Amino acid sequence: MTSAILPTYARADVAFEKGEGAWLVSRRGERYLDFGAGIAVNSVGHSHPHVVAALVEQAGKLWHTSNLFEIPEGERLAQRLVDATFADRVFFTNSGAEANEGAIKMARRWQHVNGRPERYRILTFEGAFHGRTLATIAAGGQKKYLEGFGPKVEGFDQVPFGDHEAMRAAIGPETAAILVEPIQGEGGIRPVPHQCLRGLRALCDEAGLLLIYDEVQTGVGRTGKLFAHEWAGPEARPDIMTVAKGIGGGFPMGAILCTEEAGSALAPGTHGTTFGGNPLAMAVGNAVLDVVLADGFLEDVRRTGLLLKQRLAALRDRHPDVIEEVRGEGLMIGLRCRVPNGDLVSAMRDQKMIGIAAGDNVVRLLPPLIVRDEETAEALRRLEAACVALEQASAAAPTAAVAGAR
Ligand code: PLP
């Protein structure tokens, strides 16, 4: 079928019309177990009654006023985020890339207002993904996203993933900040060791840099802590953190969280957004936070994540020709594959289960955080069937996927 939509995505041949918790129902009436959550977005599952009620209630009252007026729902959400994190201030955005753009501007401007305008460069790790705007593709530094889009935006340097000494060596008189994902998501669920995060904090303190975490994918409970860097303790706290995806549970929104010091760089008039923080988004954000901050919720994510990981480790042992490694934290899990990862994603889809391909030949499992034990057990049954189907296909055609990848 020809489509009027620009073909920037290779879409699977299925459309969904309804979602319930960890399940999606296709237009053909098939039920899919959703372990992709719209790429780590549907944090509290599909159609969560509390979030739906908040959205509907706000939709009947007021959607948008612009940031020229006070927005009490936004004040409340910002205060709750501040109370729950390292941050003193919040700026709301519509997406992860917009949050990262703002964080980059904040870091550069902070150096500028502190008398160091020559410090504008940002250091990142190879394999990073920070979005699709001109600055964020430069920050990610990946050729496949940069190619053909003109000169790379100046001021971004990549160092090998997790290499502390390379990071130290890359700091120069023009460096303003370090920007990293505590666990690389698109890069293939690659956790930065906790020691390394603490080391980055120390490097920033020594050199007068700001430390920025991109928690767009790792945040809002995904790893079993509200934010993933918390696993590394207070010695790893950032100056700035970007959030999106799960914070709106499917409603497009994001945020920049920062310390008073870092945020002081953006005085009135220096940065803005038309839609960011509008009453509708804020009502949804508050409702999502009600769920995620409820007693026992994050403990449950940790417990479910551990259970899932144990079951997946056993699956890997049963199917070593398909799955090489299980890694990640909480409900952000990567299966490094011995077959092409796209083959496993397709085989899972044949079993009516959704997973998402990532770099480093990984399939990501990112279920809604409300996923129940019986659903993780069902996920394992479907994954097992997918592995068996791939093995049988390879036995029938020995040059195919499994044997070929060995
Ligand atoms: N940062 C990270 C770590 C991401 O995973 C993503 C999206 O996948 C982004 C930024 C970009 O977010 P958005 O697509 O909302 O602009």
Image (tube, grey):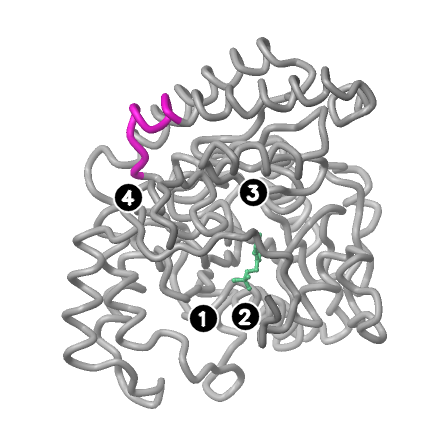
Q: Which residue is mark 1?
A: 94
Relative to 142, is 136 above or below?
below
Q: Are marks 1 and 4 in contact (CB under 8 Å)?
A: no
Front residue of this view, candidates 186 and 103: 186
Number of residue marks: 4
Badge nearest the viewer, 1 or 3: 3
Which quadrant holds residue 288?
Answer: bottom left
Q: Ligand 1 closer than 8 Å to the CB at disc 1?
A: no
Q: Are marks 3 and 4 in contact (CB under 8 Å)?
A: no
Relative to 64, is 44 above or below?
above
Q: CA distance from mark 2 to mark 1?
A: 7 Å
Region in magenta: 370-378
Q: CA distance from mark 1 to mark 4?
A: 24 Å
Q: Residues within 10 Å of mark 2 (few under 14, many from 20)?
A: many
Q: Ligand 1 closer than 8 Å to the CB at disc 2?
A: yes
Front residue of this view, candidates 69 and 95: 95
Q: Are marks 2 and 1 in contact (CB under 8 Å)?
A: yes
Q: Amino acid at mark 1?
A: Asn
Q: Are marks 1 and 3 in contact (CB under 8 Å)?
A: no
User: Residue 182's spot in the image, x, y percent?
Assistant: 57, 42
| Disc assigned to residue 21 | 4
Mark with earlier residue (1, 3): 1
